[in-house]
Image (cartoon, rainbow, N blue to C red):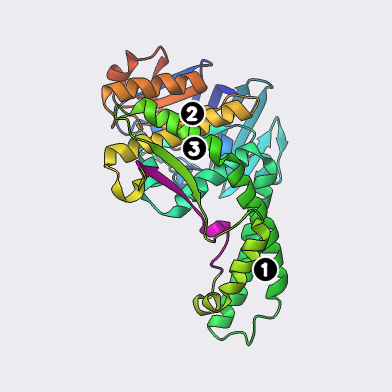
Amino acid sequence: MYLEKIVLENFRNYTEKSLSFDKSGSFLCGKNGCGKTNLLESIYILSYGKSFRTMNLDELVMLSKDFFRIKGSFNGAVKKKIEFRCSVDKKKIFINGVEISNLKELIGTIALIFLSLNDINLISGEPSLRRRFLDSLLSLLFPDYLADLLDYRRVLRQRNKILYLRKIGRRDSTAGIEGWTEELIQIGSRIIKKRLSIMKDLNKCVSFYYTLFSPEKDKLSVGYSPSFQFNENIDESFNDSIRKRRDEELEKGMTLTGPHRDDLLITINELPMRKFASEGEQRTCAISLKIAKASFLKNKRKDDPILLIDEAVAELDIIRTEKVLNSITEIGQCFIATTKCEMLRNMTSLKKIDIENEKGK
Ligand SMILES: Nc1ncnc2c1ncn2[C@@H]1O[C@H](COP(=O)(O)OP(=O)(O)O)[C@@H](O)[C@H]1O
Ligand SMILES: [Mg+2]
């Protein structure tokens, strides 16, 4: 899919703004603070139903206004109109004019990947960020995965509540936990199997881009790092592990085994990147992960993804930048927000949109 047109009303610094785009995308140029990230944010919201910057809808409404609206027309295998309305902290989402009742109906409609300078956290940060990366990719590939994930979180909350209340003495026993444990193992095993099913291809894809972007001959590898040892029977291993750790669970007041505790292990020449790689290597790896995600979606889904790039290539040297730009523009429609427009413009043929001149219109 690609975004043909977007209309913003009272969204952040845009009072009223209508923009049309080419199938290949645009360079969004302009000084700091002119609204480049805001525009990317509005496109992101149409795809995920939430912002990448805040959970607070109030922040998105233009100061002194009481509502905002984002309308997007997408084209591709099919045409789709998506509208996001928000007033007094209440949001409404429409697909082709019909209001949806659950965010699940929106997620997966538009495959969109957002790259920013914060992506380095994907390598250097907490395991939860890498899980989120995997979960987001799998949710865009398999609608069942998202349903399982939401179910798993619900069951996990219930199970943790029993363990926690027992720990602080507000319950005498863990009665009732068995049912939740069984559900947790059933859904959790499905989640782990789905994650494992893409690891080989994902590893290949990320390594491909990393090698393409880095001048050295380093060997990158992405593998699954589970919270418990398992053999080919994941359900059984999960069951064994959770039972073995029951005392520890009671002591900590939470569930310690399962996909919510798993991680991706990313190594460079066999050494964990999180601890041993330089900032430049981590950045290149983070970009490789995100581009691999986009390329993966392009191959496995019937429509091309959209890529939002917020200054993410700004920290790379010229050779890497050129290679990254070539790779992303091959995958799908790209929106590249940058203050370094003059430098980047010579490297691709994307159309330039001057955001600076648009402010306040
Ligand atoms: N709710 C809002 N109402 C009005 N202006 C806003 C709102 N939220 C952010 N802004 C303005 O948007 C600008 C920042 O836009 P941003 O897209 O982050 O800039 P950049 O082009 O550097 O990416 C700031 O000037 C900020 O004051
Ligand atoms: Mg910005």
Please tell me which of labels 1 and 3 falls first in the chain: 1
Q: Residue at x 63, y 31 (%)?
A: 82
SS under mark 1: helix
**What residue type is disc 1 on?**
Thr
Q: Which residue is disc 1 drawn over?
A: 181
Please tell me which of labels 2 and 1 falls first in the chain: 1
Q: Position of residue 69 (x, y in %)?
A: 56, 35
Cα distance between the residues tagged 1 and 3: 32 Å
Q: Position of residue 88 (x, y in %)?
A: 56, 49
Q: Which residue is disc 2 drawn over?
A: 307
Q: Residues within 10 Å of mark 3 (few under 14, many from 20)?
A: some
**What residue type is disc 2 on?**
Leu
SS under mark 3: helix
Q: Nearer the viewer, mark 2 or mark 1?
A: 1
Cα distance between the residues tagged 2 and 1: 39 Å
Above or below residue 137? Residue 291 is: above
Position of the N terminus, as image quadrant, is top right
Cα distance between the residues tagged 2 and 3: 20 Å
SS under mark 2: strand
Above or below residue 47? Residue 249 is: below
Do the CB atoms of the residues marked 1 and 3 lie less than 8 Å apart? no
Position of the C terminus, as image quadrant, is top left
Do the CB atoms of the residues marked 2 and 1 lie less than 8 Å apart? no
**What residue type is disc 3 on?**
Asn
Instruction: Name the one closer to the observer, 225 or 9.
Output: 225
Q: Residue at x 58, y 32 (%)?
A: 111
Q: Residue at x 63, y 70 (%)?
A: 159
